[in-house]
Image: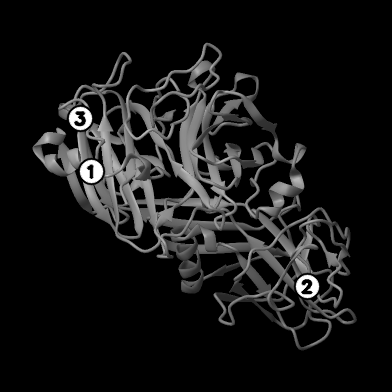
Amino acid sequence: MVHTYMRKILPILLVLALSLRAVTAVTVTLSPQKDNTLFEDKTGQLSNGHGIYFYTGRTGVAGLRRALIAFDLGGIPTNATVTSVSLSMFLSTPHKQTVTIDVSLHKVSQNWGEGTSDAGEPGGMGAPATTNDATWLHTFFDTAFWTTPGGVFSSTSSATTGVSTENMTYTWTGSGMVADVQAWVSNPATNFGWVIIANEIDPGTAQRLNTRENSSNPPQLTVTYQTSSATPTPSASPTGTVTPTPTSTATPTATPTSTGTGTPTATATPTATATSTATAAGTPTPSATPTPPATFGNISTRLLVETGDNALIGGFIVTGTQPKRVIVRAIGPSLTPFFSDALADPVLELRNGSGGLILENDNWQSSQRDEIIATGIPPTNDLESAVVATLPANTSNYTGVVRGVNNGTGIGVVEAYDLDQAANSKLANISTRGFVQTENNVLIGGLIVLGQGPLRVIVRAIGPSLPIAGVLADPMLELRDGGGALVAANDNWRTDQEAEIIATGVPPTNDFESAIVWDLMAGNYTAIVRGVDNTTGIAVVEAYNLN
């Protein structure tokens, strides 16, 4: 029997709708998340975070320039296969050129920031750096530094294009860029973008390119990727009534209920939100690369955000003894490249286990701006919301509640990231409840196992024991790996692994419910819930760490 205090729910990170078709190709075009220029300067005081141009190469009088650019790839499924990548940038060099200058992209190895500095027009000399700007010396001015002045990046070019004619758009593409983006999609925690390098030998050959702040011809990244028949792909579907956060109790009982105002209240259950689909977006997620010891990734849930009790609520628990510093984000408009009905203006509340308000935000730059930027993962759209908080541990419960401004509706994402993994505490659990339909609109919980394995888990599909109307009478459960291959399946938990499931101490309470006990190595997994004979209804998918 596994002791109660050792059980924790494994994070369900990406709740998606399963595409049952063969290989599906998707093409998305993304705007930069951030860009900046490194101006060669021994004191590290110059930057151009919000300028409309960035620069690369050697100037005639002021030394080297190196441009930085990064894109948020969080909306692409982590198990997608990237097939092509191209970056278009507009050359606005304000002088005639008689030779072609090679401009190359190199993968950056450290995170960096974009402050509010603005060198104006023409901007080639830079402006005084502001908080969290990248400079020649700093990754985030003026508290964090490059390991090597001038930026840390791969010596191998990912792509090179020759530029010559000014006021023209150029394109960078190739297998090196595909490899970079594939690595970032699979392991978002390493996505620090590219540094743009030009001729660093001959004076007067520096190049000027338009930035994301430029209203004319800003950079664009186009990515084409594929998902297989068992690979999660985005699709919206109806939702049920949202419910508040999970608690640390090891025995799941009733599904939580919300208050008359939609404010979450804690109950003795590990179920959290009402959702039927979700993908992570606008942000990086943790790597599945083994790092000791076995641990959890971040928490993310996507839902069609509606009004009243049908807001999006993501519940999580902080276990351990030391306070945990987190960023919680509400993402909406940056999902537009993936979903036409993305939530236009999300509002975020962070509440404790008793429903008390800890922090709230509408538009992340309106409060805690510097703290949010310093995390390295600010939202990419100014209408999105975020809060940074240090939360007590000791199995305390929290909810991130997302609604639309003026009762707006649309697809939104709520996310919680661990900003202090060295602390003796962690984000311990989440479970997701949603309305299970058929075909693409099944319920899928995505989970990532980090660190040295194996990690023994129990995954459960709960329906008939939920004390609400409209439940899924007979849920079936599949566990699949990151490539979509079936790991295990179950319909009615007593038919397979009965003794092992009972030994966990958390068997389902209804014989028609399903469960799987398995040892998982580091990697990405999905837990898929369907109804027998294509039946529909509300169900819960959840996972427990049994180590």
Q: Amino acid at mark 3?
A: Glu
Q: Which mark is residue 136?
A: 2
| Colouring mode (rainbow / by chain / secondary structure / one colour) | one colour
Q: Is residue 521 above or below residue 365?
A: below
Q: Is residue 345 above or below residue 144?
A: above
Q: Amino acid at mark 2?
A: Trp
Tell me the CA gap for discs 2 and 3.
58 Å
Q: Do the numbered discs 2 and 1 sit on residues whose CB atoms are within 8 Å?
A: no
User: Residue pushed farthest left?
Assistant: 495
Q: Specify whether 108 is left or right of 463.
A: right
Q: Position of residue 257 (x, y in %)?
A: 43, 18
Q: State the residue position of label 1.
A: 1
Q: Quadrant of residue 91?
A: bottom right
Q: Which mark is residue 13?
A: none
Camera-nearest residue between 257 and 101: 257
User: Residue pushed farthest top?
Assistant: 260
Q: Amino acid at mark 1?
A: Met
